[in-house]
Amino acid sequence: MSRPKTKVLFVCKHNSARSQMAEAFLRHYAGDRFEVYSAGLEPAKVHPLAVRVMQEIGIDISHHKSKPISDYLGKLKVDYAVAVCDIGEEACPSLHPFTEKLLHWPFEDPASFKGTEEERLANFRQIRDLIHKRVRDWVEEIALGNQGPSA
């Protein structure tokens, strides 16, 4: 009998870039072991530059939709809720009753970056790469059973 998949909910303000990328990376690397969701406090359309930079590395998120956190709170108990933005506990709805562990991985919001399209793309790529590394490192930590300080 197989073990149930670990449920993970990535949360950020708009669910338009960071949480979408984190969701896609975790599905890509460990979708066989994790049930992965993402949501936003104030959902907005998935950012086209997020779609573009993920396509550059062979991951298609063009079908992803932004979802409000209310779609999950009180309806789904997750093993991990991961806030991938820098909003504090006071701005984030209390996730503790709905999760075993609340993790904070604050990444800069690439959608808020101003500049030329090429500068904005460079910023999205940088954030994408940081999220990619953090998700891969976390999957390795989980696989090793190490829930040290970064978990």
Image (cartoon, helix red, strand yellow):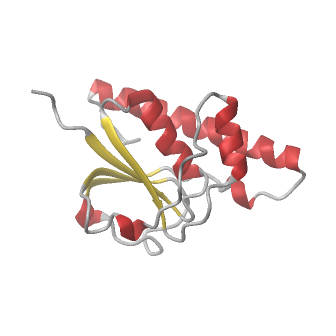
Determine which quarter of the picture holds residue 2: top left
Horizontal and vertical percent for residue 115?
87, 55
Answer left or right for 52 relative to 44.
Answer: right
Q: Which residue is at the far front?
A: 63
The residue sitting at 55% across, 65% down in the picture is 13
Answer left or right for 53 relative to 140.
Answer: right
Check the image and report above or below for 134 versus 9. above
**Number of numbered labels in the structure image:** 0
Q: Quadrant of the N terminus?
A: top left
- Observer-nearest residue: 3 or 123? 3
Q: Which residue is at the far right?
A: 116
The residue sitting at 32% across, 29% down in the picture is 32
Q: Which residue is at the far left?
A: 1
Q: Which residue is at the far bottom?
A: 90
The residue sitting at 73% across, 61% down in the picture is 112
Check the image and report above or below for 124 versus 140. below
Horizontal and vertical percent for residue 137?
46, 30
Determine which quarter of the picture holds residue 55: top right
Check the image and report above or below for 126 versus 85. above
Q: Quadrant of the C terminus?
A: top left
Horizontal and vertical percent for residue 65?
53, 56
Answer left or right for 3 relative to 141.
Answer: left
- Observer-nearest residue: 101 or 75? 75
- Observer-nearest residue: 73 or 66? 66
- Observer-nearest residue: 125 or 86? 125
Horizontal and vertical percent for residue 129?
63, 35
Answer left or right for 52 relative to 10.
Answer: right
